[in-house]
Every structure is written in structure tokens, then in C-alpha cells.
Image (cartoon, rainbow, N blue to C red):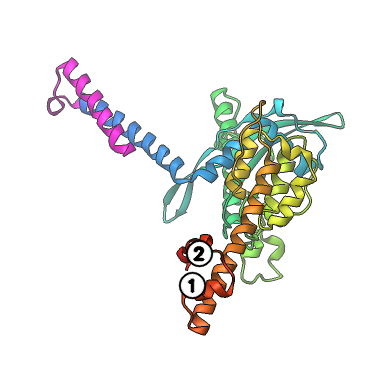
Amino acid sequence: MLRELLEERFLLIVSVEMANSRIKIEQDIEQKTIVCSKLLCYNFSISNIEREIAMGSKDVQTKKYMRNPQIFADFFNGYLYEGEEVIHWENLEDVDSAGLAIVPVGNGKKRNLQKFRDILKQSVIKRNDEAYYVILGIENQSDVHYAMPVRTMLYNAITYLDQVELIASSNKADGLCDGQEYLSGFRKCDTIKPVVTVTIYWGTKTWDGPTTLRQMFNELDSKIEAFVDDCDINLFSIIDMREFPEYRTELRELFNLLSTRNDGDAMAELVSKDDKFKSISRDTAEMMRDFANVKLPNKDKEGNYNMCKAVIDLTNKGRTEGHTEAIAFSIKSIMQSFNQSFEQACAVLKIDAKDMERYRKMI
């Protein structure tokens, strides 16, 4: 539907342009070239839109949430520095998440690789009177990816390659390279920034995939093991964690809730003992809704949500539904095992007439 609509609008624009210039496409090669160029740009834009839609709402939601500079800085302070505020969100700069590399594949052939990372930011870190520069990346996973180490290794390599090519291009433009340095454009004194990529797993099942490249090998000769590169995905699996670093944002409440989402009683106990769940911001509340299946309550005067009430209501509803399903199962068992009618089975269980129709629909 989206493609058809945009195609229709595009053709209308082309028709107007052609009418105004009074030039027919068949008679003007130059005009054909212009139209084709516009069409290529249009198709590329459509592909980007379709790619974003295909990612799914949950993937878009996690990218949007974790891209927030304050959330992003808070997460890495917890992951790298045990909650110490070393990375300041004001110092974060977005890095182009689209990476492109031309890779030789043998027989003189090359392959174009274009990869889109979830979130990529660079920062300056000041510690012990020293300044360190680093590029920080997050890859969000709603499902287990069994080739994640290879994917992470490729992402990191492309990010390093982008840095080298940017420096080389600048060096050559400024005429700074000669001799051996001219071939690569990268000088002996040039440096690049380290890349740290963390995989955040948002799924409800335990991560059972490899977390390092070496775990993907079937067997490895001990003689060559020291020469084989490895890559760690730096897995942060929320469902598999029970303790989290100290956070200054609502990451603490979000991660604690999601880690207990498979146990309704544990989730209810968690929120009932922590008053911070009584006033959760909209963005965090929506993450809880999407990943813990918690229905959002009405907003308070400040526009926040009482997720304590929402979770307890969800737990009580689950208990009620579980009790109802148990009674329906008992009715069915009596009917089948003792060759009783529905009414007779309900009489045995002393079910009120007003509830009988509800159970009849469940059987």
C-alpha cells in the first residue's frame, strides 16, 4: 500500500515536470537520465522504509529507548564502570550506523557489504587526569541469534575500517602522505578509536547461543588455538540476570521487572516493595508493556504511570484465569471419564447456574 501510494505520487510529479518542460521522454535522452536517477533515489528510499517496518515494532522500540543519550550513558556506566558516572551523556556524539565495505571474495571478485548497526555513539572518557576516546555500540536482540559472534566481529571490523578510510581520505586530500604511507593513506602516527559492542538480549527464554567466536567451532587444534582470533559479543541477557549494576535512570526498574516477567508472583513482589514503580515515565512504561505484557494504567497528573498497580492487576487476572481454566478442565474430565452430561458435571462441582454458560463456551 505504501509503495503504491508513493509510486503514484512520484509518477504524478514526473508528469507535471514533463508537462511544464514540454519534453517527451522518448525524444530526450537527457530527460530520461534525470527521471531514472530520481527513480533510483525513490526506490532506495522505499527500501529503507520497508526495512525499518520489517524490523518489527519491538526492535524499533528498543532502538528508540536505548538511543536516548541519558539512557545510553547510564547503561555503559553500569556495564563498564559498575555504576560510576564516567561517561557523561552530554559528551556523546552519534556515529553513522550504516557501514559499507568492499570485500574480496576470490577469483578477482569483490562483494559489497552494507550493514546497519542498531546504535553507535562515540565519547571522550576522562579518568585519572587522562582522556580516552571510544566508540560504543549496542545491538538489540529480541530472539537468540546463533551467529551473533560473527555478526559482531563484522560490525566492529567495518567500524574500524570506516575510521581508517576517513583518516586516509583526509590525509590524501591534505597531501600528508608520501612513500609507503601513500598506498593506504594511513600514516604511522595516525590512530583509531577502540570499539565496544554490547549485545542486549530482550527475549523471554534463556540465551542458549554462542557468546564468543570460538564457541562456534566444532573442534580446534590446540597447536593453532593461540593464532585464532576470537570475538566476544559482550552479552547482556536480561532474563538470565538477577542482579544489575547501579543505574541513575529507570533502567534499574525496567531490567528488574523484565528479569522476573516469567514469574508473576516474583514480579508482583518486586513492584510491591519498591515505590519507584508507582511513578514510571511513559517511555519506560511502554517498554514494560511491550516486553512484560503489562497493560498500562491511566496516567497520573505528571503524565507518569503506576506500574505497581498494573503488575498486581495482571497477576490477579492470571490467577483468576488459571482458576477458571482448572474448573473447565474438571468439568470436561468428569464428562469424559464418567459419561456425564455438561449439566451433570456442573452439578457435581456445585457450579452456579449463572456461571455455567461461561464454562460451556470453554469446553
- Asked if residue 132 shows in the view, the reply is yes
- Characterize the local packing of mark 1: few (<14), some (14-19) or many (20 or more) Cα atoms within 10 angstroms: some
Q: Secondary structure at mark 1?
A: helix
Given residues 294 and 145, the one toward you in this image is 294
Q: Is residue 75 left or right of residue 282?
A: right
Disc 2 packing (10 Å; few <14; some 14–19; many ≥20)? some
| Residue 231, x across and y down, in percent | 66, 54
Residue 356 marker: 2
Highlighted magenta segment, given as a residue range: 1-29
Q: Is residue 139 above or below residue 219?
A: above
Q: Position of residue 85 (x, y in %)?
A: 80, 33
Marks 1 & 2, CB-CB < 8 Å contact:
yes
Q: Where residue 118 sits in the image (x, y, percent)?
A: 57, 41
Q: CA distance from mark 1 to mark 2?
A: 8 Å
Q: Which residue is mark 1?
A: 343
Q: Quadrant of residue 173?
A: top right
The quarter of the rendered structure image containing the N terminus is top left
Observer-nearest residue: 210 or 204?
A: 204
